[in-house]
Amino acid sequence: MDLNNQFSPGLLSFTDQGDFDYGAFLQGDEISFGESAHGMTSGGGFSDDSHSGQATPPSPDTRSTSNASTGTEIARRQPAAKQRLERRGHTKSRRGCYNCKRRRIKCQETRPACGHCVKTGLKCEYPALPQIIHQASKPPHHQIPLFSLQDMRFFQHFLTQCYPHHPLKQEEIWTHEVPCIAHNYDFLMHSILGFAASQLIREDPSVIPSAMGHRIKAIKAIKKRLAETSKTSISYEEANAMVATCFALTFQSVSLEDGLAEYMTFIRGIMIVGMQMMFRGIKPMFGNLEEGQQDAILEPLMSNLPLIQTSWADAAMEAVTNLKPLCLEQVEIEYHQALVEIVQNLYVDSWQAYKSYSRQYAWWMLLPHHQFQELINPNNQVMLLLHAHWVSINEIMTFITQQEQRAQDNPPRVRETQADIDPGFQRWLKHINGHVDYEHQIYNQWPAWVEEQLDRDMSFFGKSKF
């Protein structure tokens, strides 16, 4: 996946850099799908051919769209009017669960699980006290927290086991340069610890509160600092600390069931900080940020890859094509066209399919703010369908996208005690499929089939353990 691109001032949707709100991309009220409609998960109409390790995608008969003429009459958004609902005032919940804190909604604080988590099917975890104590002798964004032995475990795990594989071939930066500056910036340190803790959850669920606690602190700290940078100077070190923080928060989002919206949001954060570094003449610490540099690394690994199974591409193309009548808004039309392009290339060339897939990230980055807000709108059922199909396409081409990790010069070593294959984007697929309402489930049968195959065998589409 191409998380980076080269930007010029002409690409920007704003002109006055001094007045730009650097914290706008972290508007916490709008970065979660957790409060969307909780319709039933679609599960009917699929062939249960499990013999010989094969499974058949839903056929045209089993996922008939003969109702396409009435499809556009289905209630496609909630509500139809685009006016924003005003938030009701409430007293702050100081001891709320991590999911409610992350969504910035009031937690009922009921035990063992609050109402919001029960409603959305998320695991409810509450913070443990006491919290981190800060030294008060330095400016706010340079406060140095006191960390625990558990945090040292997370830090060691990050250095040896789970540093991000993006930007490509930057392992030395992640394991040497970034740790050397992390102690100066609490947002970076918390993002590293939170990401590492999330990678340990499958083998040690007791670290969930720590993973979410560090994430919340990192988001709060970087949001505050980003909002300040339009009026203050920023050093080489701090700018690169912000970029590294956004990368770490992006990768941690993969561990969250409802993390797709935050994943998209922090990818935009990488772009925003990167643009400001370019305008101020600050050199990035990371290399291989330009698309051409990444292509040069990946093309030798991907240019001769085989095609995916034709039946998978056929099922994907039919499912995506059936969404076209529902896509009426410009952002939906563009999203749909991008999905069609990816699948078309899956028939022809795996490398070209990957490049089409990577362009999706650049599209997210450059969307105008109002269109991006619609992209992550949890009440837009059409957008949920598009997301479900995008994640499903990612899953069926996993053996292609995993070449990114094989490009590493010094990949993290896989421990014998490490849990089996990480679900990755499958977490998002389960969550999104569970929030597609009853009227739209007829359009979501292929993503439900993909989820079913992954539940049976995580390696069904070629995913491997790293």
Image: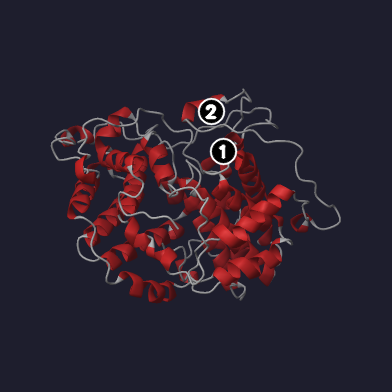
The residue shown at (80%, 46%) is: 133
Residue shown at 47%/30% (left/top)? 121
Say above or below: 184 vs 278.
above
| Residue bearing the label numbered 1 | 103
Which amino acid, mark 1? Arg
Task: Look at the image and tell me whether residue 429 can be seen.
Answer: yes
How far across and how far down the image is residue 396, in percent?
Answer: 30, 52
> 4 above or below 456?
below
Q: Which mark is residue 429?
A: none
**Horizontal side, residue 353 vs residue 176: left or right:** left
- Relative to 138, is 85 on the left or the right? left
Pointer 2 local density, CA inside 10 Å: few below 14, some 14–19, many at least 20: many
Which residue: 38% across, 71% down?
Answer: 298
> Is residue 257 or residue 138 the one in the foreground?
257
For mark 2, give the secondary structure: helix
Front in this rendered view, residue 179 or 224: 179
**Distance from Cα at disc 1 to Cα at disc 2:** 10 Å
Ranked by sequence position, the earlier of labels 1 and 2 is 1
Contact between marks 1 and 2 (CB within 8 A): the answer is yes
Percent of width and height locating residue 287: 53, 74
User: Picture coordinates of residue 280 (x, y %)?
Assistant: 62, 73
Q: Which quadrant is the C terminus positioned in?
A: bottom left
Q: Which residue is mark 2?
A: 116
Q: Secondary structure at mark 1?
A: helix
* Kind of residue indicated by mark 2: His
